[in-house]
Amino acid sequence: MAHHVRLLPLLCSILIGSLFPASLSADAVQVRRIPQHGVQPQVCVDTDGVVHLIYLVGDPAHSDIEYVRSVDGGASWSAPLRVNSQAGSTVALGSVRGPHLAIGRGNRVHVAWMGSSIAEPKAPHGIAPMLYSRLAEDGKAFEPQRNVIVSHPGVDGGGSVAADQHGNVFVAWHAPAIFKGIEQDRRVWVARSIDDGATFATELSISDPANGACGCCGMRIFATDKGFFALYRGASEIVNRGMHLVDAGTDLSHPRDREIDPMKFGACIMSTSAFGQASDHLLAAWETNGQVFWSRIDEPVMRSHAPPGAGDRRKHPAVASSADGKVLLAWTERTGWNKGGSVAWQIFDRSGTPMADAAGRRDDLPAWDLPAVVCSSGGKWIVLY
């Protein structure tokens, strides 16, 4: 990588510190529905071990974001707190446009999401905004939502948020370089705050302009104390839909964009991707041609790993790692437009080999939903959906 990764104690999608026994079975994974029959959970664990969770409720076209926290590893949750200050200002449709969550300096909660058709304030030209809010200092409410798009509107596949322990907060989305441009004109834009989200600078492009960006595919960003990372799907020449990884400095300098998994397909596949953090590695997960993969991205040579079998339209991966290097990958199967399906999972050993008797599935995944993963302080994996 262009920047050495020294990983922080702050963990998103995993609580480090629990060791697994020599063998694992399916009952090592607890599978739980999230509160209020919500969908699209996003999970982070802060430096005090508190689990933070957001999810969507209500009309899929005009949803609301709820926030809860747990001090007992996800066994129980606080009363829900509404994130969006305008009712119905986010979107569950497509499973790619929902909110993302990050924990920053002082364990401050940050949330960003693509605005719905009624969301305010609008982006330039009166179209969908990329909205941001943070938990107020007293922890009792979220601040009024703000649009961070200044110069490059056109968000479609949603966006993402990341934060570090030095006051940097990043909000990212992809949109055309020129208003109303085609997919091949799209780039990944990042607005950066250096004051814990109080203010944001005008967005910068970090992706290679030659790659374009798949219009209705989601994207993901992640930040450590020494680097910034982004996953997005390209769209050059219409058919080049490979997954790209960008790494840059925390000031977004010297971005390096590389294709990590090529794919040929002549349309948008409405995909999502994920990052996961371990004590000594940074993980990425994505989908290609109906299969899901994960890799340690800070190794000299990236090696991708997939669960056994072909599956049935595997999508929307979530990934996490234990302190001893095992990895849990969760994903969806058999989903479609306004159609639920299954959530499945597989645990891999340190070498990336799928472990026997360490997999499972549930067949009651609601429409528009996807999984999140946490490893509890008691050593139990928790799959939330």
Image: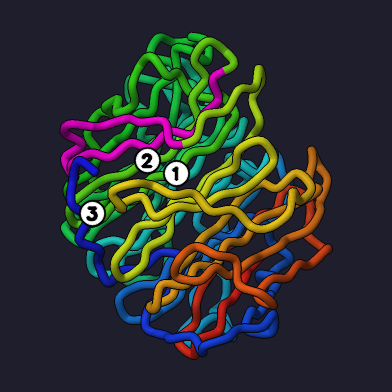
- What residue lies at 58% left-to-right and 86% top-to-bottom? 23
Residue contact between numbered discs 3 and 2, judged by CB atoms under 8 Å: no
Marks 3 and 2 sit apart, C-alpha to C-alpha, by 20 Å
On residue 196, the disc is 3
- What residue lies at 34% left-to-right and 62% top-to-bottom? 103
- What residue lies at 70% left-to-right and 48% top-to-bottom? 314
Q: Sequence order check: which comes first, mark 1 or mark 2?
A: 1
Locate the C terminus and report the quarter of the image it occupies: bottom right
Above or below, 357 against 111 in this view is: below
Mark 2, Cα crowd under 10 Å, few <14 / some 14-19 / many 20+, is: many
Q: Nearer the viewer, residue 79 or 343?
A: 343
Label 3 secondary element: loop
Q: Give the labeled residue for mark 1.
A: 220
Label 1 secondary element: strand
On residue 311, the disc is none
* Image coordinates for residue 254, horizontal then vertical, percent: 17, 31
Above or below, 177 against 333 in this view is: above
On residue 230, the disc is 2
Q: How many marks?
A: 3
Residue contact between numbered discs 1 and 2, judged by CB atoms under 8 Å: yes
Q: What is the magenta range?
A: 240-260
* Image coordinates for residue 95, horizontal then vertical, percent: 65, 44
Q: Amino acid at mark 2?
A: Ala
* Image coordinates for residue 102, horizontal then vertical, percent: 38, 58
